Amino acid sequence: MQIERYLPKTYNSLPEEGSVTWESPSNIALVKYWGKYGEQLPKNTSLSFTLSHCKTTTTIHYTKKEEGDFSFKVLLDGVEKTDFRPKIETFFERIVVYLPFLRSYDFVIETSNSFPHSSGIASSASGMSALALCLLSIERELYPDMTDAYFNEKASFLSRLGSGSAARSIEGPIMVWGEHSAIADSSNLYATAYKEKVHPVFENYQDTVLLVDIGQKKVSSTVGHNLMHNHPYAENRFAQAQENIVKLQDVLANGDLDQFISLVESEALTLHAMMLTSMPYYILMSPNTLKVIEAIWAYREETGSKLCFTLDAGANVHLLYPESEKQAVLELIKNKLFVYCQKGQYICDSVGLGAKRLAP
């Protein structure tokens, strides 16, 4: 089986202590993943822009102990977060077969986000990928001949076991996760960098995130994914996503921004349509989300702008647009859209190249 390639050889010796730091970005899916099976495997292929500034920075300090139960403490912005423990415990249980040294250390995990946690900007993607990268760097100390290609692949594989979308945060600027017949080397086990032709208009594409609601989501993504089981429209949705991957490939190659807008906005609204038609049904958009969408449509009608929106699993709105429109869009935000943001907050971002290890 392919997963056997991620099983390590026997460790000859383990370092007594050390620390490692990584920063890993969030990502925003253009074709959405919603619905999974098995151990964090996607029911459809997704394709995403890797972001640049919306990121998590994580440092792991590790001290050797007698092999036994997992031992770790988690701090967010310097404050211990016991409510993070269950998710990390589950993550460790899933990956310990691939990183057996997890039972041999006391870990202190220090983490911070450059954006609000649990508000629909995929904090789990950046957070779990940063954690996986730190842990895999410890293993790389034991196997210094590990290639970069294998490191990135295994990091994505491990990240997926913490949060599905985290698989897409390792590299950039465009990532694909999930097997698709039209994309060579695509896999359900890990994400790969998109290697097909990309039109220059998508270079340094902008993503300004309007923070419509920075509170905790009422329904977590994990619960939302599980509600796709027995969903009346699930199979049609999975087929639609596979078709949209092919359509998006053409758009990325030819730079047709009108088609890009139609596809990306339809994908965003379809994601939330799945939530509205789940049982039990629920809504993650807010009234201000809809006001922003209507304002974007009006602005595009008036100006011919190529500005469009997408949504993650939350109320916040991602404004996507070519770099040439940056000044105009920022004026639109300042003059009209910022009033729909909680405390007037928004984050200016753009496509990025993936995670980066920081000096100790």
Image (cartoon, helix red, strand yellow):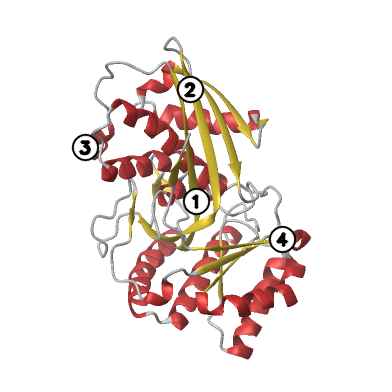
Q: Mark 4 highlights which residue?
A: 345
Distance of label 4 from label 3 (alpha carbons): 47 Å
Query: Is label 2 in contact with label 1 (beta carbons under 8 Å)?
Result: no
Q: Earlier in the sequence, mark 3 or mark 1?
A: 3
Residue 62: numbered disc:
2
**Residue type (three-letter) at the residue carrying disc 1:** Pro
Q: Is residue 65 above or below residue 340?
A: above
Farthest residue, direction top: 66
Closer mark to the observer between disc 4 and disc 2:
2
Q: Residue at x 23, y 33 (%)?
A: 145
Q: Residue at x 57, y 32 (%)?
A: 110
- Secondary structure, mark 1, is strand
Closer mark to the observer between disc 3 and disc 2:
2
Distance of label 2 from label 1 (alpha carbons): 23 Å
Q: Earlier in the sequence, mark 2 or mark 1?
A: 1
Distance of label 1 from label 4 (alpha carbons): 19 Å
Q: Earlier in the sequence, mark 3 or mark 2?
A: 3
**Residue type (three-letter) at the residue carrying disc 3:** Met
Distance of label 3 from label 2 (alpha carbons): 31 Å
Q: Mark 1 highlights which residue?
A: 25
**Residue type (three-letter) at the residue carrying disc 4:** Gln
Query: Is label 4 in contact with label 3 (beta carbons under 8 Å)?
Result: no
- Secondary structure, mark 3, is loop
**Residue type (three-letter) at the residue carrying disc 2:** Tyr
Residue 1: numbered disc:
3
